[in-house]
Image (cartoon, rainbow, N blue to C red):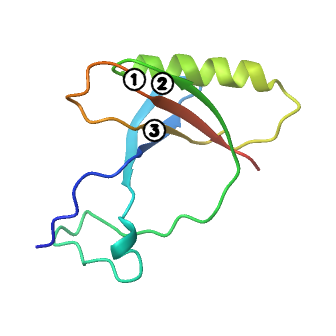
Amino acid sequence: GVGMGMTAPVSITAFPAEDGSLQQKVKVSLRIPSQFQANPPCPSDESIKIEERQGMTIYSTQFGGYAKEVDYVNYAAKLKSALGSEVAYRKDFYFCSGYDPPMKPYGRRNEVWFVKE
């Protein structure tokens, strides 16, 4: 019953398949606004869970436009190539992050994050 508005970024946890495409399983995460962090309202939908994300170090790349799955897959491949084989990061998932509301036509910001091991 509490309206919190939209927060940024919206993060989608993507689980890559062997060929680099994304599995159908995804997890969408929204940041709880600061004023609700200490005592977040309980979700009324049992499919919604409140999780605390621990601090992490990430490797990221940024791109613009209206991001589609193919864009995230392509930029994840570019980031993987840029990091090479010497850098240790989680290979079982990565984050696809968007910072802008759907009605913003220009200057959009999207990122792919790999979590450092």
Disc 2 crowd, CA 10 A, few/some/many (<14, 14-19, 20+): many
Q: Is residue 97 visible?
A: yes
Q: Nearer the viewer, residue 71 or 27?
A: 71
Q: Nearer the viewer, mark 3 or mark 2?
A: 3
Residue that badge 1 annotates: 69
Residue type of the residue flagged with mark 3: Ser
Apparent side of residue 60 relative to residue 116 in the rendered image (left or right): left
Label 2, on which residue? 72
Return the x and y of residue 64 as percentages of the image width and height.
44, 19
Which residue sits at x=52%, y=32%? 111
Q: Position of residue 60 (x, y in %)?
A: 63, 34
Question: Which residue is found at the position 60% from the left and 66% from the top?
Answer: 54
Circles 1, 3 touching at the beta carbon (< 8 Å): no
Residue 97 tag number: 3
Mark 1 crowd level (few <14, some 14–19, many ≥20, 10 Å Cα): few
Lower position in the chain sequence, tag 1 or tag 3: 1
Tell which of 83 and 61 is nearer to you. Answer: 61
* Residue 9 location (% of width, % of height): 41, 45
